[in-house]
Amino acid sequence: MRILFVTSEIYPLIKTGGLADVSGALPAALASLGIDVKVLVPGYPAVLSRLDDVKVITHLPDALLLEGSMPNTRVPVIAIEHHDYFSREGNPYLDKSGCDWPDNAARFGHLSKIAARIASKDSPIGWMPDIVHCNDWQSGLAPAFMHFSGSKAKSVLTIHNIAFQGNFPPDWVERIGLPMSAYTMHGAEFHGHLSFLKAGLFYSNAITTVSPTYAMEIQTPEMGCGMEGLLSHRKHDVHGILNGIDPEEWNPGTDPYLPDHYDASRLEGKLGVKRALQARLGLEQNDGAPLFGIVSRLTYQKGLDLVHACAQGFVDQGAQLAVLGSGDHEFERAFLDLAKRCPGQCAASIGYDEALAHQIMAGSDIFLMPSRFEPCGLNQMYGMRYGTPPVVRKTGGLADSVTDNETGFMFEHTSADALYRTISRAIASYRDKTDFGRIMKNGMEQDFGWTNSAKSYVELYASLMS
């Protein structure tokens, strides 16, 4: 079984969010099951500089294809070198000012087109996949290009977040090489725009989401972002497969970012990490203060307004708060202001720091993740792995991975009051060392590795091939 895994980012080569973590871990898990898998990714400077054993495999009229291997897993990676599209500063999607690159349609249309070319009988690399596994809108046109080129390979599209759809003016249809026949309601047209995501949902052979609950949620008007009609029509092709995490990358017993190590049978080291985190962030050195952690994009989706609204209340209960993230400026300012108002109890770090992310995950007592919607979420799994029970809202992958009062704390209604009551319940549990210890160990004993998820994908691939 040959799988071409198409993605716009992959950890540890380049990362802006959870898609990179999945792209780094799932292909490796598939390879461990004996699958012949290659990853196709744009050749950003960071990718080309971090791949091992890079060599040119073919020259195309509109790109140079290089192959290397992942530095940690040795999974083969095909990088598309295209100077005009990918050799630029900024992140994969935004320029240095935080605005979308104006030619994103061309850039990721090119990624999709190369994927379809590799999936053709005239594959330019001498290797043709049985399955092309696309991820989010950035590779959503690949199933459409495969359809119109007559590719015999099957296609799968995974929705990591349906709110990001890749919608562009219709003049891009012919500019990126799609026939105008694709630009219809039964195709890639979406409210007068070319939609990369809708094209993938329409033309792919199967659709997956990153949790079973999210697969059902996106078939409703409340959560479908306008795609619910198409998804409901294709409901038998929609599969929810919960993401996993890399248990070696996220391991409190060996994590190189931590000043001390621990596991479920030896929790003493966690207190040392908490003390070091408090010192780093300027928080009061208080072993008994319940320390809440947030590592997140600072956006409305993540429910950070709910946290800010009730923060003073739980700080008044003697709790501390450590925030790491970036996003909407109003949220960044709000948490910076909170830190100024509550010195020694609240700290906010704007931006992203991998070491600090691990330290907050391990050094906090309780992790906050009150998302309005969460397709899967990985941080709640990291939290449980690190003995840091999460407070989550009952939605998407949070509902599928956290059990209330067993591995974490859950609330249902999207309100600051509901969150505050749940945080208060978590604080009460924290002060009952027997009860909190039970919840910590329950979470640490969960198996969130990728093996089971990878087996589910292999079963799906096999069903498409048969």
Image: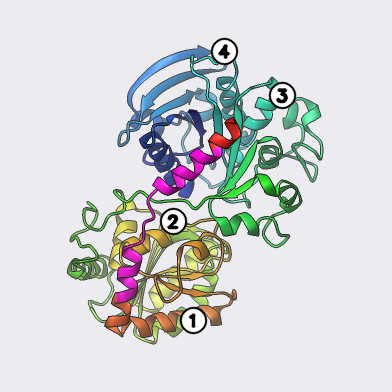
- Mark toward the viewer: 1 or 3: 3
Q: Amino acid at mark 3?
A: Phe
Q: Is residue 29 above or below residue 125?
A: below
Q: Which mark is residue 44?
A: none
Q: CA distance from mark 1 to mark 3?
A: 53 Å
Q: Which mark is residue 61?
A: 4
Q: Which residue bears the numbered disc 1?
A: 420
Which label lies toward us, 4 or 2?
2
Point out residue 47 in the picture as x, y percentages from the top left corner: 40, 32
Mark found first going from the N terminus, 1 or 3: 3
Residue 414 is situated, as x and y percent measured from the top left of the image, at: 59, 74
Residue type, numbered disc 4: Pro
Q: CA distance from mark 3 to mark 2?
A: 36 Å
Separation of disc 2 and disc 1 at Cα?
Answer: 23 Å
Residue in the picture at 42% in, 51% down? 244
407 to 131, vertically: above or below: below
Where does the magenta region start and end? 438-460
Q: Judging from the image, what secondary structure is the residue with disc 2 in?
A: loop
Circle 1 residues within 10 Å: few <14, some 14–19, many ≥20: some
Q: Secondary structure at mark 1?
A: helix
Determine if residue 118 is in view: yes
- Please report whichever mark, 3 or 2, sits nearer to the chain's N-terminal start: 3
Q: Which residue is mark 3?
A: 148
Q: In the rendering, at what x and y percent does residue 437 appear?
A: 28, 76
Amino acid type, residue under disc 1 in the picture:
Tyr
Residue 12 or 390: which is nearer the viewer?
390
